[in-house]
Amino acid sequence: MFGNKVQRKRRSLARSLERVSVPERPYIGRGPRYLVHPEIALACAPSLRSMAAALRNETVAFEDNELRAIQSFISNGAGSALFGRDATAAMREAVRLQHAVIAPKAAVQDSAQAQAESNLGYPSPSPALTGS
């Protein structure tokens, strides 16, 4: 039951990321011409597309705070660099989020892989040193 809701949220977020990565046409009329300026959309596009691909990958687990950070980046107009005019700041934020999203561990790990990651390449102490 909950898996479907989480998958729907991830797919929706992935669609939104892909939509934002495409530069929009200018709006002629009252108000701003662009919600996301085309230069910013082009600068952030590779990171946004890779986040969308990672969200669609069902074998990767995500924490709720990571999903909230991505949602805030693409929907918070006042607090997000994506809706500003500084392409460098927006690209830095998109890359930071990309590293946070792509870095998660796989949802299913075998015990040998988990043990190898926990040791970080260091040998376990000998029984003589640990007193056991």
Image: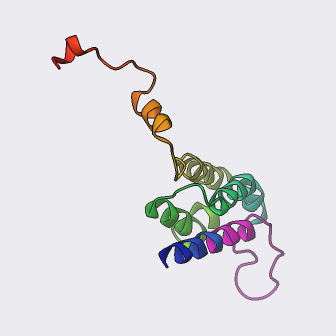
**Residue 68: horizontal and vertical position, in percent?**
49, 66
Residue at 40% across, 20% down: 122
Above or below — where is 101 with respect to 118? below
Q: Is residue 108 left or right of residue 91?
A: left
Residue 11 appears in the rendering:
yes
Q: Which residue lies furthest to the bottom in this view?
A: 30
Q: Which residue is drawn at 52% across and 56% down?
A: 61
Measured as percent of width and height from the top left, residue 74 is found at 60, 68
Vertical arrangement, residue 45 with respect to residue 103, above or below? below
Q: Residue at x 15, y 17 (%)?
A: 131
- Along the viewing direction, whichever of 114 and 102 lies nearer the viewer: 114
Q: Along the line of sight, which residue is nearer the eye, 96 or 13?
A: 13
Quadrant for the C terminus, please. top left
Is residue 85 at least partly visible in the picture? no
Q: At which x and y percent is residue 86?
A: 65, 56
Extreme residue toward the left, this view: 131
Specify whether residue 19 is painted magenta. yes
Label total for image = 0
Tell whether 84 sits left or right of 130.
right
The magenta stretch is: 12-36
Instruction: Name the residue nearer the viewer: 127 or 41.
Output: 127
Indicate whether residue 27 is drawn in magenta: yes
Magenta span dominant secondary structure: loop
The percent coordinates of residue 43 (x first, y second) are: 74, 53
